[in-house]
Amino acid sequence: MVTYFIFTVTFFLSSLEGAAAAVGLHLNVDKTKFMAPNIEVETLTARSGEPIQCVEDFVYLGGHLKSSEHDFVVRKAKAWAACHKLKSVWETGLRRSLKVQLFRATVESVLLYGSETWTLTSSLERRLDGCYSRMLRMALNVDWRQKVSNATVFQQIPSASENVRSRRLRLAGHVHRHPELLANQLLFWDPDRGTRGRGRPKLTFVDTIKKDTGLKSANEIGKLMNDRDLWRRFINARTLKPP
């Protein structure tokens, strides 16, 4: 649920609790949280009178909502754990093609889980690509002392940042073509309330899509997205290139 006003949240929350109670269900207050970015925090309570906790960050479907950087750090730790569990496989003489398929299915999928929604700065992209490169070298049993170039290691495998860019653009196009989805209303959302904190403005999802496409107008991007085949060709032309 996304809204500007606390009374709107209160109304929908009360309606949800009422509908749930009608079929014998109840709201678990301990598992219910809300976030209030860039606005003054107000009290939110359930119908029972119990206060609902306001949090700085929230994990939804395995992803951290507040910060792409924090989400990346968590995913990186999980991916390294998955990579090390398969160390005995990486050290075998299994042919490269099978190792690559296994790596992308078991390690890459963990690292890039939920990455479609990430907003990556140039610095974070370099960290992501460096992490992915080290993991791939481990999977292919290529030691850094062998001085093998990334071009040789990757061959036709796209870099992690290119993979994320492709996933992000595909998700954005799908959401834009389905106006019945709530996410459709948020795709090019530009908040007109609240205040930015001091310092350099944080990169938004809209900013990232414009950067990915090289286009400055949301309307122009939307027109491209409306044509699925054209959008797919556009994505393939700009992403999924080996490093």
Image: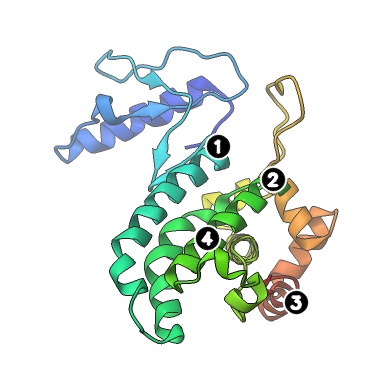
Name the amino acid, label 1.
Ser
- The answer to whether residue 119 is above or below residue 146 is above
Compute the Cα span from label 2 to label 3.
Answer: 24 Å
Give left or right: position of 183 versus 239: left
Judging from the image, the colouring scheme is: rainbow
Residue matched to label 2: 123
Crowding near the residue tagged with mark 1, few <14, some 14–19, many ≥20 C-alpha atoms within 10 Å: some
Which quadrant of the structure image shows residue 106? bottom left
Residue in the image at 45% along x and 66% along y:
138
Q: Earlier in the sequence, mark 3 or mark 4?
A: 4
- The answer to whether residue 203 is above or below residue 85 is above
Q: Nearer the viewer, mark 3 or mark 4?
A: 4
Q: Are marks 3 and 1 in contact (CB under 8 Å)?
A: no
Residue in the image at 32% along x and 29% along y:
32
Crowding near the residue tagged with mark 4, few <14, some 14–19, many ≥20 C-alpha atoms within 10 Å: some
Residue matched to label 1: 67
Question: What count of labels does the image hold?
Answer: 4
Residue 7 seen: yes
Percent x, y for residue 104?
44, 71
Say the numbered circle drawn on residue 237.
3
Compute the Cα span from label 2 to label 4.
Answer: 17 Å
Percent x, y for residue 226?
70, 70
Percent x, y for residue 22?
19, 37
Q: Are marks 2 and 3 in contact (CB under 8 Å)?
A: no
Residue matched to label 4: 134
Q: Nearer the viewer, mark 2 or mark 1?
A: 2
